[in-house]
Structures are given as C-alpha cells and as structure tokens.
Image: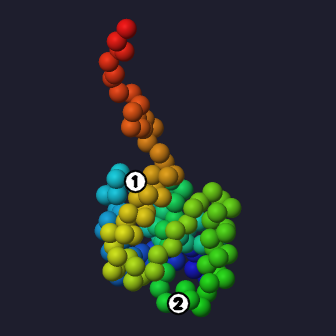
Amino acid sequence: MTSLVQTARELRGNATDAERLLWRFVRNRHLSGYRFRRQVPLGPYVADFVCLRARLILEIDGGQHNESLLDDLERTQYFARHGFRVIRFWNNEVLQQTEAVLESILEALIQACPHPSPLPQAGEGELREAPDE
C-alpha cells in the first residue's frame, strides 16, 4: 500500500498540463507573495495546491471528475471542516482562461488574508482645510 506522501510525489511527477501551467504562476510566491505548495497530503486526501497562510486549497479537475462529483463533495466538506476554503477549476479553464483563474485566486487570497494596514477608503485620512469661521 502506498502512503499519501508517495502518492503526492507521484502526482507531482505526473502533473497535468493545467497543473503545470498554474504551478508556473503560483510557485515561489509569484502570486502577490502568497506561498503555495502542490500535491499536499491533508488527512486522507492529497490537495492539488495549498496556501496554508490563507487556508486556501485549489483543486484542478479534469473530465474524470464528472463521474466523481460525490467524492469531490466529500473531499471539499472534509477540507472545510478543517478550516480550508476550496476553489475548483476545470483543466480547460486554467488552460484557456488563465488570467481569469489567477484573478479569482488572488481575490480569494485577499479575502482570506486582508492587508494588516489597509489603505484608507476614499475620503478617510485625507487632509482637509479647517472650515472658515
């Protein structure tokens, strides 16, 4: 019986085109400084991509997932029970709409980890002249 660590290694070595493409954009903190790991064993599953800081999992699904929707739901629920948010993308989305996928990921990251010192909203923090008396 292979361990999840061995399975994760095999999955990293046999990545799909979509996984390889997405990895190019999220590895080495390329996506706004967020660190992702790929093919990470979490409980009884191996998550495709994980940002631990944001508690965000990215799952890249191919055609085989049409037949395993209940398995995917169970997996997503498991991750959610352990404090992770899961975003799923189809292979063709990653390959054909890469910018939109990256924007969705970045938006989820920002929601999960807001900047510690956010910029003031319009009108806040502006210097104003004292009213004439």
Q: Position of residue 32 (x, y in %)?
A: 34, 53
Q: Amino acid at mark 2?
A: Gln
Q: Seen in the image, is 96 located left or right of residue 84?
A: left
Look at the picture and state if 57 lies above or below 12.
above
* Residue at 55%, 66% in the rendered image: 86
Q: Please give the residue where the numbered disc 2 appears in the rendered image.
A: 64
| N-terminal-most mark, 1 or 2 | 1
Quarter of the image holding residue 42?
A: bottom right
**Which residue is most to the front?**
133
- Residue 100: where, in percent of width, then height? 37, 69
Q: From what the image shows, is residue 13 above or below residue 33? A: below
Give the residue pinned by disc 1.
34
Label 1, label 2: how many angstroms apart (C-alpha)? 29 Å
Residue 20 at least partly seen: no
Foreground: 121 or 102? 121
Callout 2 environment at 10 Å: few (<14), some (14 to 19), or many (20+)? few
Side (left or right) of 94 relative to 88 = left
Q: Residue at x 34, y 12 (%)?
A: 132
Assess disc 1: are there few (<14), some (14-19) or many (≥20) residues with their C-alpha within 10 Å of its C-alpha. some
Classify mark 2: helix, strand or loop. helix
